[in-house]
Image (cartoon, rainbow, N blue to C red):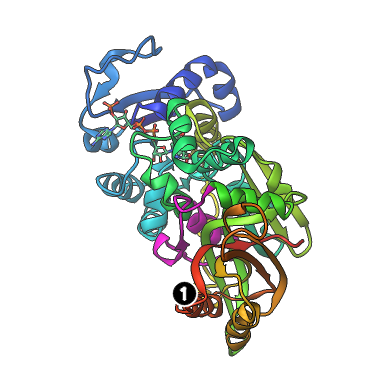
Amino acid sequence: MRLALLGCGTVGSEVVRLLHEQSADLAARIGAPLEIAGIAVRRVGRDRGDLPVDPALFTTDPLALIKREDVDVVVEVVGGIEPARSWLVEALRAGKSVVTANKALLAEDGASLHDAAAEGGADLYYEASVAGAIPLLRPLRESLHGDRINRVTGIVNGTTNFILSAMDATGAGFAEALEEATELGYAEADPTADVEGFDAAAKAAILASLAFHTRVTAADVHREGITEVTAADVASAKAMGCTIKLLCIAARGADAEGRETVSVRVHPAMIPLTHPLASVSDAFNAVFVEAEAAGQLMFYGRGAGGAPTASAVLGDVVAVARNRLAGARAASESAYADLAVRPMGEALTRYHISLDVADRPGVLEAVAGVFARHEVSIATVRQGPAGGGPAGRGSDAELVIVTHIAPDAALAATVRELRGLEIVRSVASVLRVEGGA
Ligand code: NDP
Ligand code: HSE
């Protein structure tokens, strides 16, 4: 088995290391030796430390490497949409199996890759693209294929989970926690994709596509990041026996005519401390799957990093290499259900709303009236002094309202109207509440 490796950075270099260290075991598991035919990189002359590989294998021409007749399997750990898409489509159409960790490409245009794989009769595996080392996509696309998945709720971004855990543990603000994440090497130099939720949204699209047998792209995912989460929100969550997590939620539902739909969203949410995802801290990932017959399942582990991600890549390499030796191909993409993706406005959830209001008679009634007009039912109300200062000082008060389940559009309309009230000084925060309690 000869493998073309595209990319030799954080993940690629660990793939090389593991291939070297475990070559005898891998050969035994596959039934043939596994060799690197070439490694495509951007800079051939880059210092790669003591990487156990012949320098002559490096090239800056990925396409020529892919097209070589002695290449059976292409492993892509470069990232980005183009030129990765063109390389992988070329490989798959030529009948070469592909293993990729490229969540951005799969979420943007997985269809092109799946179509090319079908055309070329090749395998397309991408376990490493969601939740790094955690075996998750294989269970979804194989082990749970006899079941019906109703909901997938996950923490799938390590950087944001580290930041929120730090804010929860130390009371730090977002900027301070991000600085710590950067110092520890979790956050990228440009952490936008992580903190704005783009990375989690790509993973949510991949998970939803597999769980619901429907092509879901990143554009279908409602996305909010964690940049607006404040230390006060975190403290408020604690006061309610909750913690704040950036969740990806993909769930079945139904439209007004009763037709089955899916909704896919990524946003920060309060979850009760008793929820299995609440104890997932630091840069760890976890995904909670609810299936009709299997019930609740939880997948937990390291969602990022060179070695953990390389572990998932090599698991896929063994699978596709075995298939090639057997002259077989894994089951192709399953998108038969083709469910419509429901707009965020129809998503049903509960909300925690914190308002700074004038502290005078009739305020509670006026605020409650706005919720009632939009048919958002209030579950609890707590009033305290504004800014957490001593009771009775100043003329403002803080109102914390938790609602029952309501459509997102109704809540948005409620908040819009509250913002226009003279008695509401500010809407300090609006957070969704997930997971019972
Ligand atoms: P890096 O930036 O560390 O490495 C990228 C590699 O691609 C480098 O070796 C680089 O070459 C090479 N490269 C970049 N552009 C080109 C090009 N045009 N032609 C040829 N080679 C090129 O990325 P990572 O290893 O962190 O990530 C790789 C993939 O894995 C991405 O899709 C990422 O989303 C995914 N992933 C990463 C995880 C992680 O923890 N890092 C976790 C899960 C998935 P050179 O070495 O010369 O610069
Ligand atoms: N930036 C991603 C994270 C890497 O923090 O989870 C893993 O996909």
Residue drawn at the location 68% of the way across and 55% of the way down: 271
Image coords of residue 209 (percent x, y)? 52, 61
Residue furthest to the top in view is 50
Give the crowd class for mark 1: few <14, some 14-19, many >=20 residues within 10 Å: some
SS under mark 1 = helix
Relative to 420, residue 133 above or below: above
Q: Is residue 39 left or right of residue 128?
A: left
Counting the numbered discs, the total is: 1
Q: Amino acid at mark 1?
A: Arg
Q: Can residue 94 be found in the magenta stretch?
A: no
Residue drawn at the location 46% of the way across and 77% of the way down: 416
Q: Can residue 223 be found in the magenta stretch?
A: yes
Image coords of residue 363 (percent x, y)? 61, 78
Relative to 361, residue 199 above or below: above
User: Does the image show residue 35?
Assistant: yes
Image coords of residue 437 (percent x, y)? 77, 61
Question: Which residue is label 1 attached to?
Answer: 419
**Quarter of the image that includes the N terminus:** top left
| Quarter assignment of residue 364 | bottom right
Image coords of residue 324 (percent x, y)? 48, 39
Front residue (pair 142, 437): 437
User: Does the image show residue 342?
Assistant: no
Front residue (pair 6, 232): 232
Residue furthest to the front in view is 393
Q: Is mark 1 within 8 Å of ligand 2?
A: no
Residue drawn at the location 47% of the way across and 74% of the way down: 419
Q: What range of the chain is rendered magenta?
A: 203-230
| Quarter assignment of residue 311 | top right
Front residue (pair 336, 421): 421
| Quarter assignment of residue 430 | bottom right
